[in-house]
């Protein structure tokens, strides 16, 4: 537990620093009140609005841990949202809608996984195919319109509460815990990391890399489907053009802010979720603090740059070298010995 | 003599383009008019120019996600500068190209200096350029300047009534220039070497750092040029323009037969990739019953076909190369 905490420490500190910064400009930032049976306040808002990116980041973490990338998640959100809205419009009810949306997401994930694992296409291109064509598929389902519905039970997924907590927030919390539990309480996480570090070596060591890769992309599709359901339920309509647009980049950013390397290997789902919350805090914080929203992207870019600098393998080498140098200077040199560097 | 297997994807691209054009022509005889050809060049000029820069980046095994935002920034920069200062458009263009080239060079320096993946560095660049465009203005700013109107209107009337516009010519020039840089210069050879493997390239004596900076600077330059063309094409600057153009450009490069792993491809192929995508759109306009979303699906299917084609060609080509070297 302490090790997990230490792994997430930079992200927790960043989040706390951001909260403190926003609180300076907007003192009521941390205020939470209980009204009409639901918690309200900026923090609750962040936890709710960050749900799609947090859900996407969970799946993306696993994909990136295998040294892959999934550019299609935003589009998969649009597809599963369209499927859900279409099912509701056909009058099939809530459970088939959720089920079919998840099946659609899983199918997309399986498609990506097969392209990567069997055909051997680079992940970035393999998922680019679905990214470009998928929005067309979603528009095909909605026939180019925004499919709206008025099913209160389905809308509850987007805007309802359980014991005052918004359902989307619970959804990413439960998904995150479940995925982290499956990955860390079994050997699965280790195997996923092994593929990311060296796929051929892991295959030689007896890991079924193909099946695992497909499973990982399917998991990403599943998470994207959940995010799509949340986004669709939230606005009570499926917008094939704009649902999840560019959220894949936010999800990748969340994973990177979470300290996971794009080169695969060690991963932490919790840190990625924290990364998603950091992005949402920046977005909401800029609005609350009264800055014009035009600054949002520039601040985001600055944040990414700082995080890149901190994580850079080259820089940490330089830093290590610098510390050794300083230590060497401090140590009194033995008399008569020469610098043996 | 066997033709070079590396030429297969390029030849396939060109063959597919002309076959598609033939099919379109059989259905709509008017497709084979200089008007359609002229519009095909004009409408895709900005995409073609930015795809040249992207081709060089992808040849080196990298990726540049920032170009779409840089185009939007360019349009806004030109519009705001022309509105707020009395500078001549030519000076504004020169300033803009300096800014975007420097922007690309800085990204290249970060990618090399910090040893970070190009994907994430250029993603930050994408946010920064788009954010800078927002900071200049959040409105669509019209450009009205006599010189600008002259640029918009300058064209050569081809026989048959088609307009061969200035920006269409600029795209062809950019393709030719890009092809020269990539295939006929020392820098181009270094790009291919890095695309083949950075470590091998370093051992061969390629200055990886300097070349990486040059690659992204070139992409920034092309994105700036594309921004100028886009501003001439639309006659305005809008910070929300050309969202996602980077991915369209990548798709065009891949359809054009360049390997996304780097190290193999031709700039000319990118021209045909861009034109093929433009042709699909033209066909859908001609047909009139197909919905616009079919464009996206067809482009996705085309992408898949080309990648599968490349995969199988590589599999065929590899033993040939091994035996010829052995």
Image (cartoon, rainbow, N blue to C red):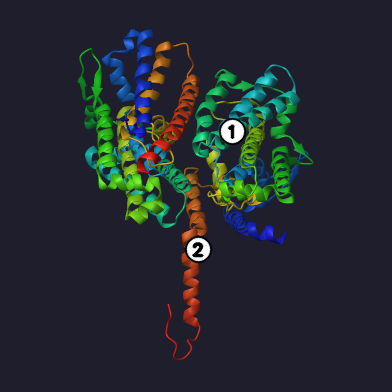
Q: Of residues A113 and B80, which is closer to you in this image?
A: A113
Q: Of residues A333 and A278, which is closer to you in this image?
A: A333
Left or right for A311, reference B98: right
**Residue A6 falls in image quadrant:** bottom right
Name the secondary structure under disc 2: helix
Badge 2 density bin: few <14, some 14–19, many ≥20, Cα 10 Å: some
Left or right for A183, reference B118: right
Q: Mark 2 = which residue?
A: A316
Whether residue A234 appears in this view of the structure is yes
The image's mark for residue B187 is none
The correct choice, above or below, for A22 with respect to B311 in the image is below
| Whether labels 2 and 1 share one chain | yes
Residue displayed at 48% across by 76% down: A326
Q: Of residues B183 and A179, which is closer to you in this image?
A: B183
Residue displayed at 55% across by 22% down: A139
Q: In 3D space, how far apart are the residues under numbered discs 2 and 1 (Cα atoms)?
A: 37 Å
The image's mark for residue A114 is 1
């Amino acid at each position: 537990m302490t090790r997990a905490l230490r792994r997430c420490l930079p992200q927790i500190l960043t989040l706390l620093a951001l909260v403190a910064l926003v609180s300076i400009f907007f003192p009521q930032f941390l205020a939470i009140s209980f009204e009409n049976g639901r918690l309200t306040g900026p923090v609750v808002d962040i936890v709710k609005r960050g749900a799609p990116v947090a859900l996407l980041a969970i799946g993306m973490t696993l994909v990136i841990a295998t040294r892959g990338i999934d550019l299609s998640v935003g589009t998969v959100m649009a597809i599963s949202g369209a499927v859900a809205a279409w099912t509701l419009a056909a009058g099939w009810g809530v459970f088939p809608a959720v089920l079919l949306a998840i099946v659609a997401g899983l199918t997309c994930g399986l498609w990506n996984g097969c392209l990567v694992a069997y055909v051997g296409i680079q992940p970035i291109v393999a998922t680019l195919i679905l990214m470009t064509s998928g929005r067309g598929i979603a528009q095909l389902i909605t026939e180019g319109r925004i499919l709206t519905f008025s099913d209160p039970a389905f809308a509850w997924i987007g805007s309802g509460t359980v014991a005052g907590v918004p359902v989307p927030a619970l959804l990413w919390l439960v998904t995150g815990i479940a995925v982290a539990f499956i990955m860390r309480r079994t050997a699965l996480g280790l195997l996923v990391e092994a593929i990311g570090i060296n796929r051929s070596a892991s295959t030689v060591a007896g890991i079924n890399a193909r099946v695992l890769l497909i499973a990982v992309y399917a998991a990403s599709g599943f998470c994207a489907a959940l995010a799509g359901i949340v986004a669709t339920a939230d606005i009570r309509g499926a917008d094939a053009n704009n649902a999840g647009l560019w959220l894949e980049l936010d999800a990748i950013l969340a994973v990177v802010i979470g300290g996971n390397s794009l080169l695969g290997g060690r991963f932490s789902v919790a840190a990625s979720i924290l990364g998603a919350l950091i992005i949402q805090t920046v977005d909401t914080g800029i609005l609350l603090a009264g800055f014009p929203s035009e600054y949002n992207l520039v601040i985001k870019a600055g944040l990414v740059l700082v995080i890149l600098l901190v994580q850079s393998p080259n820089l940490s080498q330089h830093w290590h070298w610098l510390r050794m140098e300083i230590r060497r200077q401090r140590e009194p040199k033995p008399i008569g010995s020469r610098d043996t560097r | 003599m066997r033709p070079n297997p590396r030429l297969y994807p390029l030849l396939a691209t060109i063959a597919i383009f002309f076959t598609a054009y033939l099919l379109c022509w059989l259905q709509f005889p008017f497709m084979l008019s200089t008007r359609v050809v002229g519009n095909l060049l004009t409408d895709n000029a900005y995409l073609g120019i930015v795809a040249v820069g992207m081709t060089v980046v992808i040849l080196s095994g990298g990726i540049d996600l920032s170009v779409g935002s840089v185009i939007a920034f360019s349009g806004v920069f030109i519009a705001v500068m022309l509105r707020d200062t009395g500078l001549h458009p030519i000076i504004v263009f020169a300033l803009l190209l300096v800014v975007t080239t420097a922007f690309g060079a800085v990204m290249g320096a970060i990618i090399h200096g910090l040893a970070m993946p190009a994907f994430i560095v250029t993603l930050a660049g994408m946010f920064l350029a788009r954010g800078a465009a927002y900071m200049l203005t959040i409105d669509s700013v019209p450009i009205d300047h006599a010189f600008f109107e002259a640029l918009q209107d300058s064209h050569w009337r081809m026989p048959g009534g088609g307009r061969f516009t200035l920006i269409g010519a600029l795209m062809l020039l950019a393709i030719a220039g890009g092809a020269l840089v990539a295939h006929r210069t020392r820098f181009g050879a270094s790009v291919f070497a890095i695309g083949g493997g950075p470590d091998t390239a370093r051992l061969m004596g390629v200055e990886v750092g300097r070349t990486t900076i040059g690659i992204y600077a070139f992409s920034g330059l092309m994105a700036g040029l594309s921004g100028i063309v886009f501003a001439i094409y639309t006659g305005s600057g809008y910070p929300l323009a050309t969202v996602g153009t980077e991915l369209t450009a990548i798709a065009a490069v891949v359809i054009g037969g360049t390997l996304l792993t780097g190290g193999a491809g031709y700039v000319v192929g990118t021209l045909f990739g861009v034109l093929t995508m433009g042709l699909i759109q033209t066909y859908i306009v001609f047909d009139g019953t197909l919905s616009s979303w079919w464009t996206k699906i067809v482009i996705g299917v085309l992408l898949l076909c080309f990648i599968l084609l490349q995969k199988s060609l590589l599999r065929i080509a590899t033993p040939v190369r091994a035996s010829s070297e052995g």
